Amino acid sequence: MAYQYKALAEYILQLADEQCIKDINQMKLQKLLYFIEGLHLGRCGKPLLDSEFVAWKHGPVIESLYQDLKQYKAKTLKKGMLRENPTKIDPQDKENIRIYFDAFKDTTPWELRELSHRIGPWKDIYVPYIAGLVIPQHMMEEQFKQFLDSL
């Protein structure tokens, strides 16, 4: 089942709060969502999100989430900010999300930005000065599957 981006983003903020991760800003949240979605697609062949990522200068972004959070700029985000209830997420999906989150939770926002430029299809889609090119889901699935197979 694919979930609304707000539910998944709120669940990530909840996990960060539970684990005392203090550096979740918009950039880190966007990149965590990208890696969580990519890893899930590569591993399970199905999306967690009902939203598309687009290629921006600093990496993949869900535009609607950016609009929801742009007033916070680089400030730390906290659970409850999106006013969404993540209890709608299936328990097995929550477990998978937690595993993916744990793999990247200690990575800084800028390190995640750099990783997003190397792992996954952002590098194939991004064109300087053209924001908003959609990163196709099938490319994410294929490239993250290759990444997982290489580990």
Image: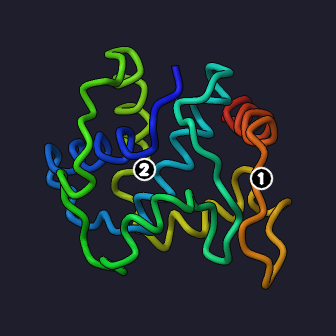
Residue at the spot x=34%, y=68% of the render?
25
Say if mark 2 contacts mark 1, CB within 8 Å: no
Residue at the spot x=32%, y=16% of the render?
91
Residue density around tag 2, few if under 14, some if 14–19, many if 20 or more, within 10 Å:
some
In-image side of 110 versus 123 (left or right): left
What is the CA distance from the residue labelled 2 to the residue labelled 1? 18 Å
Q: Where is residue 83 in the image (x, y as percent from the top left)?
A: 22, 49
Residue at the spot x=24%, y=71% of the render?
76
Q: Position of residue 92 (x, y in %)?
A: 38, 15
**Residue type, numbered disc 1:** Pro
Residue 50 location, quadrant: top right
Return the residue nearer the eye: 66 or 149.
66
Q: Position of residue 150 (x, y in %)?
A: 73, 35
**At numbered mark 2, what does the secondary structure look like: helix, strand or loop?**
helix
**N-terminal label among 2 and 1:** 2
Which mark is drawn over residue 104?
2
Position above or below: 3 against 123 = above
**Residue type, numbered disc 2:** Phe
Return the residue nearer the eye: 61 or 97.
61
Query: Nearer the observer, disc 2 or disc 1?
Result: 1
Residue at the spot x=59%, y=35% of the render?
39
Position above or below: 2 against 139 = above
Number of numbered discs visible in the structure rendering: 2
Task: State the residue position of label 1.
Answer: 121
